[in-house]
Amino acid sequence: MEKRNAPRQRVFKSAIIEFPGGAFSCVVRNFSDVGAQLDVPSASGIPHEFTLVIPSAQSQLSCRAVWRSERRIGVAFSW
């Protein structure tokens, strides 16, 4: 059974991971009030903390990675 702090909604939104010295394109796969799951070309090189920019939602969210695999990152939002 999955344990989450908030229910996640499936989405498919283009986004950008921004951090000092770099940026990566990504896709937001699911989203909640407390976090999200991101598809990335490669999780290597993406820092522990970054800003997630979702242009279609006009959002900029401070994030920290809570888990990662080769092509996915789970993040928690830093409110």
Image (cartoon, grey):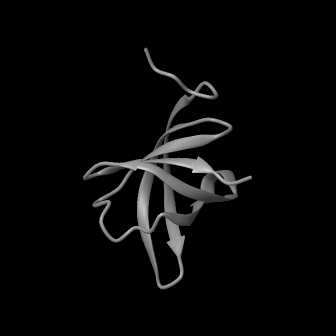
At horizontal 57% and vertical 60% (from top left) the residue drawn is 52
At horizontal 41% and vertical 69% (from top left) the residue drawn is 24
At horizontal 68% and vertical 37% (from top left) the residue drawn is 33
At horizontal 42% and vertical 57% (from top left) the residue drawn is 26
Q: Is residue 57 left or right of residue 39?
A: right
**Furthest residue in direction bottom, as rendered:** 21
Residue 4 percent across, percent down from the top left: 56, 27
Question: Measured along the vertical axis of the image, is residue 40 above or below residue 33?
Answer: below
Question: Measured along the vertical axis of the image, is residue 18 above or below residue 39?
Answer: below
**Furthest residue in direction left, as rendered:** 70
Question: Measured along the vertical axis of the image, is residue 4 above or below residue 24?
Answer: above
Query: Residue 2 or 31: which is nearer the viewer?
Result: 2
Residue 47 percent across, percent down from the top left: 44, 68
| Tag count | 0
Residue 49 percent across, percent down from the top left: 54, 65
Query: Residue 71 or 67: which is nearer the viewer?
Result: 67
**Furthest residue in direction top, as rendered:** 1
Q: Is residue 47 left or right of residue 56?
A: left
| Quarter of the image where one finds residue 7 | top right
Question: Measured along the vertical axis of the image, is residue 46 above or below residue 15?
Answer: below
Rendered-image quadrant of the N terminus: top left
Query: Residue 47 or 57: which is nearer the viewer?
Result: 47
Q: Is residue 17 left or right of residue 67?
A: right
Residue 56 percent across, percent down from the top left: 62, 53
